[in-house]
Amino acid sequence: MNLSVVIVTYRVLPFLEQCLSALELALGDTNAEIIVVNNQGGDASDDLIQQRFSNIQLISLPENLGFAKACNIGWRKSKGKHILFLNPDTLITSRSIQASIELLEQNERNGAVGVRMIDGSGRFLPESKRSFPTIQSAFFKLFGLANLFKHSNTFNAYATPHIEEKSIHEVEVLAGAFMVVKKKVLEQVNGFDESYFMYGEDIDLCKKITDAGYHLLYLGEATILHFKGESSRKMGWLHIKRFYNAMLQFIGNNEKSNLKRWLLSCAIFLRACLAFIVQTISKLRAPLSDALLWIGCLFISAVFWEDFIKEYPFPPWTILVTDAMLVFAMLLFQFLFGTYNRHASKGKQITNSLIILILILATYSLLPEHLRYSRGVILLSILLYSPLRILLSQLWQRFGWIKAEHPCFNSNSYIVCPSIYQKNVFSLLAQLGVIDVSVPISDQTPKENKTYHHIIWIISKDSTFEEILESIQRFPKSTHWWHVAGSHGLVSSKKKQSTGRFLIPGKKSALAQPYQQNMKRLIDLLVCFLLIPQALLNQPIRKAILLCFNNKATMLGIRDLYLHTGIDKKVLIPYEACYPNASFPLEQLYLHQYDWLKEFNILLKHYFRISQLLENSRELH
């Protein structure tokens, strides 16, 4: 066997399905095998492979062992002469496979080959070709000089700007998202270092291959699509910690000078802290800007009212306390209505704003009389705030501060699809509820003189994927959606820093509504407080409380909750565990008849059994 493809996946089913569908098209009649290693398996990814891709070898692991260890398990089970390590959030072409193997076989000392990668909008990913990290490159990266002078061989040496994007060149580091390695080379260097969990293992492997006397080659003439980072969607402190700990580990293993090692460690630590601060600010910027707008409207209205209508000044402490309460109430109501979760249509924004503002007036009326300084000021603030709030929401969407609403493919969209599949594509989009009859569809690339909000690309054996990858770069302002013929959904990723989006049949449910999700979050926090007495003597409960407080888990749910609702958290107590004798499908009942009050009642009912239920939870082991 000439080739074995090893894919390590972790809770990215929509992207995995597209990846495997594209991979089968790319392989064609190639003598190859596909091995999928599912970290913490037993989910819908296992079902997909067993039902639709029965020719693929599935290795379902009971827990998440990390990328390096899972890769080693996969390639050691393989039979191929060459091993392709492939990320599940990629779409590849037949040329990328064939050309890589041909280049690898040209010289006995060629050890591994990587290709040119672009993101979901056609932008080149510089990690396609890199050099080993040094103290100088770490310093320039830390202080932003690498981004400021992207084409400088001095300030951005890590990204090797001297190597042309579409050239063939020897490099020091290839990306683990697509790397073809000779199996005998892997056996010689003993594969990946399993002390790396998720990041840095590809850099370490490249270092071991070059130290063994082999060449690493960058093949810029072949291109693949990499949506980037879907297995680490939750970009929290854990992600930052793992990423920068991997960098520190690599430096510790490969830098002999104590002074250089110390300086690099300091630089990496500072970079990690900066990344955490920037990420925290990015999460809070929407509600903070909203709060500032509301405070500004209250202040301007109070000054206007005081100067032109009411002659005597308001007591400062009264204004301060009342405004603080109203700002808190506004943020709470906006949170419960899901304002900061997803961008809504203008009509829905207006409706939600009216309801929220009525609730604010009601809140004001419930305040003690000595704090109600002027109902007229509140009404004037509302009149000023309402139109500005809609404009602010548009800015949030433009700058990507909140998730975009579910798309509607209409006359401002364009579908590129071979004519033989057009009927099937229309049927799928209608099933997803995201298509309008006005959407144009053609087997030709759209004209560049018009900007489309969305472009849907259909990949099939009758389409030329290489040409499509070149075409998308001409539409940088569009959101590109991808569907491989035969799959059951669409995937998209606007930027490499942002979480990818997907549309699959059945994703819509009661729990997919922002209001229900936010109330579910509040229920989790409330139950955690109620469990504190039990937590003093029970370790699983302590772990569960910590996970819920950090927004990494939810107390109650179903398997593959993310696929149906978009809630990307661990489920600590399976819904079916509360009803062990049920004979009807509990999953559909939970999704489509979900109510946060009902969930709260279930958790209260099982309050004294929660420790037992958590002890059996696979997420806590």
Image (cartoon, rainbow, N blue to C red):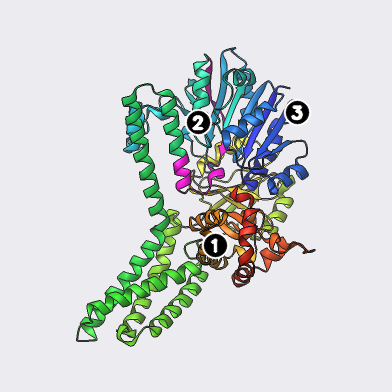
Q: Is residue 564 magenta?
A: no
Is 285 situated left or right of 513 in this image? left
What residue occupies the far top of the structure in this picture?
Answer: 108
The x and y percentages for residue 301 are 29, 77
The x and y percentages for residue 73 are 65, 31
Q: CA distance from mark 2 to mark 1?
A: 50 Å
Secondary structure beneath dot 2 equals: helix
On the question of residue 269 being in view, the answer is: yes
How many residues crowd around disc 1 within 10 Å: few (fewer than 14), some, or many (20 or more)? some
Q: Nearer the viewer, residue 469 or 195?
A: 195
Chain-order first, disc 2 or disc 1? 2
Chain-order first, disc 3 or disc 2? 3
Q: Nearer the viewer, residue 334 or 414?
A: 334
Which residue is drawn at the image coordinates 61% and 59% (left, top)?
611
> Which residue carries the number 1 mark?
534
Secondary structure beneath dot 3 equals: loop
State the mark number for residue 549. none
> Which residue carries the number 2 mark?
128
Q: CA distance from mark 1 to mark 3?
A: 60 Å
Chain-order first, disc 1 or disc 3? 3
Which amino acid does the dot numbered 1 rest on? Gln
The N terminus - image quarter: top right
Stretch in magenta: 214-242
Which residue is drawn at the image coordinates 46% and 77% (left, top)?
354
The x and y percentages for residue 77 are 70, 28
Image quarter of residue 300: bottom left
Q: CA distance from mark 3 to mark 2?
A: 27 Å
Whether pointer 1 and pointer 3 mark residues with C-beta atoms closer than 8 Å, the reply is: no
> Which residue carries the number 3 mark?
29
Q: Answer above or below: position of 161 versus 421.
A: above
